[in-house]
Structures are given as structure tokens and as C-alpha cells.
Amino acid sequence: MAWVYLLLAGLLEIVWATAMKLSDGFSRPGASAVTLVASMGSFVLLALAMRSLPLGTAYTVWTGIGAIGAFVAGMFFLGESATAIRVVAAILILTGIVLMKSTSAG
């Protein structure tokens, strides 16, 4: 169940990071509210995952999901560039997530 919590926490991290960008410095109430609620949910789920997963694994996977997800959301929803070097960097992050998952108990 810890990995499910961690996956959900990572997905909520994508939501709050994207909403934060859309909040325009917290000047848009709707996006600001989504940012706050999603970030709280993400932290709670991360804490639940950390009950049985090692800190380094949980935090690395959580931030990796958020980083890759925010990168993809930026490209597809916000028109951010997808240069070759940015895509390679995202692939390296994804590789790290897979390696952390494959070498961790829980």
C-alpha cells in the first residue's frame, strides 16, 4: 500500500506544481486553492508512504514523479519547449526512479 500512497502523492505533486504556475504568484484564487489542497494531500500521502518505505527512496521517487510530471504538464498544457537535452534529462530522472523502486523493499 505504501507504493500506492507514494504514487498518489507524486500525482498530487504534479497537480499542485501546475496549479502553482497557473496561480500567477497566488494572485488567482481558484488555482491558489488547488495548489494548497493538492500540496497538503501530497504531503499527507507521502508521510503515509514513509511509514514503511525508506526516506531516501520515498523522497526520491516522490520528487521524481513530480519533476517528470511537471515537465510533461508544462510541455502539453503550458506550451513549454521539449528540447532534446530536456527530454534526455527527464529520461535520466525516470531511470533513477525505476532503479530506486527496484532496489527498495516495502
Image (tube, grey):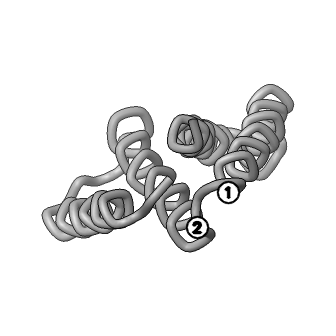
Q: Residues within 10 Å of mark 2 (few under 14, many from 20)?
A: some
At x 45%, y 59%, the residue is 105
Question: Which residue is nearer to you in this view: 23 or 34?
Answer: 34
Q: Amino acid at mark 2?
A: Pro
Q: From the viewer's perspective, tell me whether residue 9 is left or right of residue 104.
A: right
Q: Which residue is mark 2?
A: 54
Question: Which residue is nearer to you in this view: 31 or 42?
Answer: 42
Q: Position of residue 39 (x, y in %)?
A: 75, 44
Q: Secondary structure under badge 1?
A: loop
Disc number at residue 38?
Answer: none
Look at the picture and state if 87 lies above or below 48: below
Q: Secondary structure under badge 2?
A: loop
Q: Residue furthest top?
A: 30
Q: From the viewer's perspective, tell me whether residue 84 is left or right of residue 63.
A: left
Q: From the viewer's perspective, tell me whether residue 77 is left or right of residue 19.
A: left
Q: Position of residue 31 (x, y in %)?
A: 74, 32
Q: Which residue is mark 1?
A: 50
Question: Which residue is nearer to you in this view: 17 or 65?
Answer: 65
> Would you identify the image quadrant in which residue 101 lies?
bottom left
Between marks 1 and 2, how big is the CA–CA gap?
Answer: 6 Å
